[in-house]
Image (cartoon, rainbow, N blue to C red):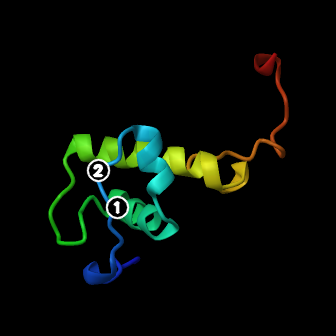
């Protein structure tokens, strides 16, 4: 099971970002990984449960960060379709 990083070492954003784009742009790889763990476990590092709204916001931030920083095959939700056979439904 994956464990959270030490809370004292968790990165914080320097100030309140002006927009969603600024928020995603300010996210570090460490923060991205911490959000992924929080979503996977359904809890923040302090043990509190994520609310449905927090889970949704975290997922959106993770997906947006992935789009900017990771190749397609490493992103959340990627499905490798190269080995799938085409059918008449794919047209």
Residue 85 position within the rendered picture, expressed as x and y whole percent measured from the top left: 85, 36
The answer to whether residue 90 of the structure is visible from this angle is yes
* Residue position for label 1: 13
* Residue position for label 2: 16
SS class of the residue under badge 1?
loop
Residue 34 position within the rendered picture, expressed as x and y whole percent measured from the top left: 39, 67
Q: Residues within 10 Å of mark 2 (few under 14, many from 20)?
A: few
Q: Which of 90 and 74 is in front in this view?
A: 74
Q: Residue at x 84, y 29 (%)?
A: 86
Measured along the vertical axis of the image, is residue 50 above or below residue 81? Answer: below
Q: Which residue is drawn at 41% across and 48% down?
A: 23
Q: Residues within 10 Å of mark 1 (few under 14, many from 20)?
A: few
Distance from Cα at disc 1 to Cα at disc 2: 7 Å
Residue 82 position within the rendered picture, expressed as x and y whole percent measured from the top left: 83, 44
Find residue 79 and report its image quarter.
Answer: top right
Measured along the vertical axis of the image, is residue 13 above or below residue 5? Answer: above
Q: Quick check: marks 1 and 2 in contact, CB under 8 Å?
A: yes
Which numbered tag is attached to residue 23?
A: none
């Amino acid at each position: 099971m994956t464990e959270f990083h030490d809370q004292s070492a968790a990165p914080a954003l320097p100030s309140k970002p002006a927009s969603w784009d600024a928020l995603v742009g300010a996210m570090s790889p460490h923060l991205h990984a911490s959000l992924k763990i929080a979503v996977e476990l359904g809890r923040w590092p302090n043990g509190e449960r994520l609310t449905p709204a927090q889970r949704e916001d975290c997922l959106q931030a993770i997906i947006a960060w992935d789009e900017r920083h990771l190749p397609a095959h490493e992103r959340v939700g990627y499905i490798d379709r190269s080995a799938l056979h085409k059918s008449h439904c794919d047209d």
